[in-house]
Structures are given as structure tokens and as C-alpha cells.
């Protein structure tokens, strides 16, 4: 059993490191996002939860742009809702949990996907009469599979945000949503060309790639190994490649080889959805 944090009546423990690397426990109860999520749930409902013990066994490495923090928040909030219901209360709905996840992480990018599954786009819309967030589930074609890889060294989102310029050239700001349109269509149809063109980013990636030794080689290696496209995952330091489901092991291995102390694996995350749904 790994480190143990206690906050009030709740407790969190961490399982042993997996082959994905250590989960890096050791946060204080004030820092630990799982415990903070329980406290957030209680503050929002105004009622205490029964004493809870969360035992986290996560294979998602921390600080690699793969959403470990959003996953921990989602797991703790779902546990809180289940415990609330078991205690005879009406639990917070998923929509409310997503808003709490946004407040806890500061952005909705990972928490929303962790709470909903599949691929999501979430945009905070404060002041909008229809609600404070617009959430869209993006359909992914069932021919597609992913590979992820990450180096030994983490890159925390706040560090990766600090290197971004406050202003971007107009041409880059225009090009990114154009490419996003291709990416969304590529995800829905599985078209390799649209995916290759759609992952190209001109806003954040070149600044962040400079922080991750070997990332250019990792991306080139994934393409050579048959992936349709590859890019930095989230804020980094991980890398993600997309290609044909069931044949992404070579891309994962190629990316891992290029990253310092790299790990990699193919991931079967495809969730087929018939059309875009709004939540
Ligand atoms: N239970 C937890 N699980 C994951 N990250 C946590 C947890 N508690 C606190 N953190 C903090 O969240 C941050 C990781 O988030 P971030 O930098 O966005 O990377 P990731 O892509 O892994 O979510 C780290 O600063 C880490 O210390
Ligand atoms: N998409 C945001 C936040 C990324 O978070 P991460 O946990 O996936 O690194 C950004 O790029 O800043």
C-alpha cells in the first residue's frame, strides 16, 4: 500500500506502482485532489458524507498530459455521489459533478471526459442563460485506436501553460479552428488524411515541445510505425498517436523509444457514438 492521506473523516490510499510507472502519491490532504473532491461535494450539498476510504489504483501516470488529475477528481466525485445516495440522499447529477470538476481543476478538459467517457469538448459559458457550460460528446469511428507514450519526467500543466505567449498571431488563431474542423470530421469518419491534417496545432504545441526532449522523434517514429497522426497529449509531456485499432503497439513502442526513460502502450478507447450529443 502506498502513502495514506487523511482529511477529517475521509481517507485515501494508493496502490503500488504499475508498469506505467509510479503514481506519485505523497500529497498532503490539502493538496490531494481526491480528498479535495469529497470536501467540494460536501460543501456544495451542505451535508457531510459518511466516512469514506478511497483506494486509488490508477495506471495513468501523473503530470504527463494524460489526465490523471481529472480521473482522480471524477472517481472521487462519483464515489461521493454513490455514498450520498446510499445514505438516502438525492445525489448530485452528473452535470453538477462536471461543474465541481471544473472548479477543482481550473479547466474542464479532462474531468469532463473522465465523468462522461468517450471524447468530449467542454466550454465554460458563464452568464449564458442555458447554463454555465456547453458539453459536446464527439463521436469516434470504430476503426480508430490510440497509442500513448510518456517520458520519465513529468511536466505539470501549470508549467506547460507558463511557456505559452499571451498573444498569438492572427493567422495562427484562424488556422487552428480550421484544423479542428478537419480533426472532428476525421475522428468521426476515421479518414487518415483528415486526422493527419487535423492534429496540426499552431497555438501551443511548438512552445511545449521544446520542454520535452525527444518529442519530435517520438512523433516521427509513430508515423513511421503506421500511425495516421501524432501530437503532444494535453499539455505534455506525454504523446498520443491515432491510427488503426488493434495495430497501435508499434507506434507506442516507437514513441517510448524516443522519450527519455519512455513508457508506451496502445489503448482501446474507442467509443462509437451515432451522432454528436449535447449535454
Ligand atoms: N489524486 C491525485 N491524482 C493525480 N494528480 C493529483 C492528485 N492529487 C493532486 N494531484 C496533482 O495534480 C497535478 C497533476 O495534474 P496535471 O499537471 O494537470 O497532469 P495530468 O495530465 O496528469 O492531470 C499534479 O500537480 C499533482 O500533484
Ligand atoms: N488542455 C489544457 C489542459 C491540459 O491538461 P493536461 O492535464 O491534459 O495536461 C492545456 O493544454 O493547457
Image (spheres, helix red, strand yellow):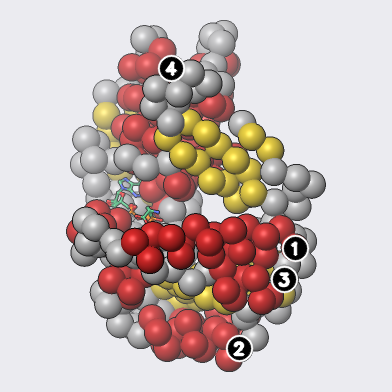
Camera-side mark, 4 or 3 = 3
Camera-side mark, 1 or 2 = 1
| Distance between mark 1 and mark 2 Cα atoms | 22 Å
**Residue 191 circle label:** 3
Q: Nearer the viewer, residue 148 or 81?
A: 148
Name which of mark 3 and mark 2 comes first in the sequence: 3
Asked if the residue under mark 1 is in contact with the one under mark 3, i.e. CB atoms within 8 Å, the reply is: yes
Q: Quadrant of the C terminus?
A: top right
Residue assigned mark 1: 189
Whole-percent x, y for residue 241 in the image: 56, 73
Residue assigned mark 2: 225
Residue drawn at x 30%, y 82% is: 213
Camera-side mark, 2 or 4 = 2
Residue assigned mark 4: 50
Image position of 202 with respect to 3: above or below: below
Asked if the residue under mark 3 is in contact with the one under mark 4, i.e. CB atoms within 8 Å, the reply is: no
Name which of mark 1 and mark 2 comes first in the sequence: 1
Name which of mark 2 and mark 4 comes first in the sequence: 4
Amino acid at each position: 500500500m502506498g502513502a495514506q492521506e487523511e482529511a477529517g473523516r475521509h481517507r485515501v490510499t494508493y496502490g503500488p506502482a504499475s508498469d506505467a510507472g509510479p503514481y506519485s502519491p505523497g500529497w498532503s490532504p490539502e493538496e490531494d485532489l481526491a480528498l479535495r473532491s469529497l470536501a467540494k461535494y460536501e460543501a456544495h450539498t451542505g451535508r457531510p458524507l459518511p466516512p469514506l476510504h478511497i483506494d486509488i489504483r490508477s495506471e495513468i501516470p501523473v503530470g504527463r498530459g494524460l489526465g490523471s488529475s481529472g480521473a482522480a477528481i471524477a472517481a472521487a466525485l462519483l464515489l461521493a455521489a454513490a455514498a450520498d445516495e446510499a445514505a438516502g440522499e438525492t445525489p448530485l447529477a452528473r452535470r453538477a459533478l462536471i461543474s465541481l470538476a471544473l472548479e477543482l481543476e481550473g479547466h474542464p478538459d479532462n474531468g469532463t471526459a473522465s465523468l462522461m467517457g468517450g471524447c468530449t469538448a467542454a466550454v465554460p459559458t458563464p452568464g449564458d442563460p442555458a447554463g454555465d457550460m456547453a458539453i459536446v460528446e464527439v463521436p469516434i469511428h470504430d476503426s480508430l485506436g490510440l497509442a500513448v507514450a510518456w517520458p520519465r519526467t513529468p511536466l505539470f500543466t501549470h508549467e506547460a501553460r507558463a511557456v505559452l505567449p499571451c498573444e498569438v498571431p492572427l493567422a495562427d488563431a484562424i488556422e487552428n479552428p480550421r484544423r479542428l474542423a478537419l480533426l472532428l470530421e476525421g475522428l468521426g469518419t476515421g479518414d487518415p488524411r483528415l486526422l493527419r491534417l487535423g492534429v496540426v496545432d499552431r497555438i501551443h504545441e511548438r512552445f511545449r515541445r521544446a520542454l520535452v526532449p525527444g518529442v519530435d522523434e517520438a512523433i516521427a517514429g509513430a508515423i513511421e510505425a503506421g500511425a495516421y497522426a501524432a501530437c503532444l497529449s494535453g499539455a505534455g509531456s506525454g504523446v498520443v498517436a491515432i491510427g488503426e485499432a488493434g495495430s497501435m503497439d508499434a507506434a507506442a513502442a516507437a514513441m517510448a523509444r524516443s522519450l527519455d526513460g519512455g513508457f508506451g502502450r496502445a489503448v482501446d478507447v474507442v467509443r462509437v457514438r451515432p451522432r454528436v450529443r449535447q449535454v
